Image: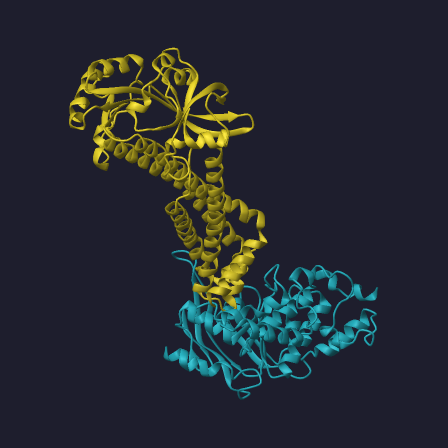
Amino acid sequence: MNFYESFRIALKALGANKGRTFLTMLGVIIGVMSVILLVSIGTGVRKEVTGQLEGFGTNLIYAIPGNFEEMLGGGGGAMAMPSRQFNNDDVEAVRARVSGSGLVSPMVDGSGRLTLRNNTMFGSVSGVDGNIDEVFDITLAEGRAFNNSEVLSASRVAVIGNTVKTQLFGNRDALGEEFQVNDQRFRVVGVLEEQGGGGMGGSLDTTVYMPFTAAQRLFGNQDISMIAVKADDPEEISLVQSRIRTALQPRLGSDGFSVFTQDQMLNVMGSIMGMLTTMLAGLASISLLVGGIGIMNIMLVSVSERTREIGIRKAIGARTYDIMSQFVIESVLLSVLGGLVGIALGALGSWTIASTTAIPSAVSLWSVGLAFGFSLAVGIFFGVYPAWKASKLDPIEALRYE
Amino acid sequence: MRDNEHHDELVHDTLSGGAPGEVVLEVRDVYKTYQISEDVEVHALRGVNLQVRRGEMIAIIGQSGSGKSTLMHTIGLLDHPSSGEVLVGDIEVTDMSPNELARVRNREIGFVFQAFNLLARTTALDNVALPLIYAGVGAGERAVRAEAALERVGLGNRLDHAPNQLSGGQQQRVAIARALVTEPNIILGDEPTGNLDKRSGIELMMFFQQLHEQGITVVLVTHDMKVAQHAQRIVEISDGRIVEDRELSADERIDARVELEEYLEAAGIDPTADDFEHIGEVHDDGDVGDDDEDGPEGFTA
C-alpha cells in the first residue's frame, strides 16, 4: 500500500468524525496561533523600541531603572528588576551633577490613541523636556519645540511625528490645530521632519512629543521612564556616565539603575526583548504540547474504537506498516491542518494588532517555520504510540472485539 | 526472500487454474497450547493433520471448545501453531513473520466471517476493493475487479451502498465478493450463516455450492451439522483432535436449491414468483435495514 492510499484512508476517517476532528485540532490551532502572535508582538515591540532609540542620534547616555548592566554583550547574566521608577527629583539630581558637560531630558514613554474627528491612530507618546531638539537628533519641519515654561505649566502642547501629521491632518496645516491623545486635547506646536526607515511604525514618525509634565498627567503618575543625557563632547561620554552614576547611586542604590550609552542601550534592549520573545514563544509552545497530548488521547480512543476495523484490515492482508502509516498520517494530518489554521489565525491577529495599536507587530518567518515544524513533530511524536498500538493488535483478538 | 519468489509463482494459478486434487493447504501434526497461567495450559489442538485439495468443499465441524476456532485461525494463517507445520501449496508458512503471513493471507485466503465484518460507512465497492489496496493493485484496476466481484455475487447494482443500507444476506454477499476479489486459493467461511435468517442462510449455502461447482475451494467452519451437510467432505474435531474425516454420501448431502424450494413451499411462497436467482436479485422492498428484515415475511407482502 502506498502513501497516497494511507492518506486517503486517514482523510476519510477524519471526515467521518468532523466535530471530534475539529475539537482535537483546536488544541494545536490555539498553540500555533499563540506562538505566531506572541512572537510577532515581541519582535514588533523590539523594533519599535530600538527604532526610536536609533532615531535619537549619537552622544546620548541613558539612565534606566533596574540593573541590566550585566546583560551587555548579549549574554544572560544577573539582572535586578527596578525597586522603583525614577521621579522628578532624580532628574534634578542628574541635571545638577552633569551641568556644564551635558544636556538632560527626562523621558516619560507610553502609547496612546490619537484622534482628530473621525481619524484615529495609535502612536507612541513621549514626554520630554523643553530642549528636545537640542538633546535628541531630531529636526523640526515646521513650528517649534515646546519651551520651558510650557514644561513647567504642563501645557497640553505637542510636537508630532510626520506620519501622525499626515494620518490625522492629511495635507491640511497642523500647526496651531488641536487633536486628542487618549481623549485629552493637545495643540500642535511643531511637526518633525520625516525620519523614514523602520518600516511600519518603530520610528519617530509615529510618535507624539509633549512636555514630560503633561505626559505624567496624561498617564496619571509621577514616574519618569528614563533619563537621557546628551554629552557636549563625545570624548566625555564616560565622564558623564560616571557623573550620572554618582548622582543616582545614593538615591536608588547601585542595583536600582543602569547607565548605558546609545549603543549599549540598543544592545541591552535587544537582548531583553529577545529574551521576552523567547519566553513568550516557550510558553505558547507548552499549549502546543498540550494540543499534542490531546491528539494522542483522541488517537488512542480512535484506535480502540476501530479495533474491529484494524482486525478486518489485518485479516485481509494489511501489514504492520500499513496500519501504522494509516494512523500516523491521521494524527499528522490533524496536527498539520491545525498548524495551518493556527498560522492563518495568528497572522490575522498580528495584522489586527498592527493596525489597531502602536505595536508594529509583524509575523516573522522563523516563527511560522517554528510553529509549523513543531506541530508536524507533535503529530508524528504523539501519533506514533497509538499507531504502534494499533499495528500490534492481534487480528484474532481484534476481530472478536465488540 | 527465496520463499517469497517461490511464492509469487503460486499466486495466480488459482480458482479455475491449477490442477484439481492438488493440495492447496496442509496442516501437519499441529499442536496449539495456550498458557492460561503459570500452571494451567489449554491444549486447543493436539496433533491435527489435514489436507485441503483444490476444488474441495469441506466443512470443519465441532462443538465450541473443540479446537474448531483454533484450527480455523491456523488454516487462515491468523495464528501460529505451537508445533507442527502449515503449508500453503508447498510453501511452509509456519515460521513466517506477521507481515509475511499478512501477504500470504491477502493472496491465498478469502475470509467470510459470521459477523460479515465489512467496514462501516464504506461503500460495497470500496469494501470489496480493500484487499486489493493491500495487494498493491492500482485504483483503476481495483474498481474494475471489485465491480466484477460484486456482479458475480449479484450485487452489481448495489456498488455504492454502505453496509447499513444492505440486508444481512446482501452484506454477507459483499463479504464473499471481498473474499473472491483477490482470487485466493481458499475461501474460508467461519459460521457464515450464523447471523442470517433461515432463508438468507439457505441462499448463502446455495451460493457456496455454486462457487464449489465453479471449482473454487471452500472450507466452512461450523457447529451446525445441517450447515456442514452442504459440503462434500466433513471433518469433525473434538477435544483438539480430528475424530472423523469423511466424504459425504449423496444421500446425506443437502442440495441448497432443493432445500430452498422446500422451504419456500412450506412457507407458502410461490417459488416461480421468487425464483432461485433470488440470490442475485435486488430487494426493492423499500429500505433494507437490519439482518432480520430479510426474512420470508418480507416477501409475502
Q: Taking A100 as reference, is A398 above or below it?
A: below
Q: For residue A51, which quarter of the picture?
A: top left
Q: Position of residue B213 (x, y in %)?
A: 64, 83
Q: For residue A53, which quarter of the picture?
A: top left
Q: For residue B293, which quarter of the picture?
A: bottom right
Considering every residue shown, the one lying at the far bottom of the view is: B19
Chain A pictured colour? yellow
Which residue is depicted at the point 46% across and 72% down? Answer: B103
Q: Position of residue B182 (x, y in %)?
A: 55, 75
Q: Position of residue A127 (x, y in %)?
A: 37, 21
Quadrant in which the C terminus of chain A is drawn: bottom right
- The residue nearer to you, when weighing A159 against A12, is A159
- The residue nearer to you, when weighing B148 against B248, is B148
Residue B192, visible in the rendered structure = no
Q: Position of residue B242 (x, y in %)?
A: 52, 74
A43 to the left or right of B127: left
B144 to the left or right of A398: right
- In cyan, which chain? B
**Colouring scheme applied when the structure was drawn:** by chain
A10 to the left or right of A265: right
- The residue nearer to you, when weighing A42 against B80, is A42
Residue A97, visible in the rendered structure = yes
- The residue nearer to you, when weighing A206 against B151, is A206
Label count reads: 0
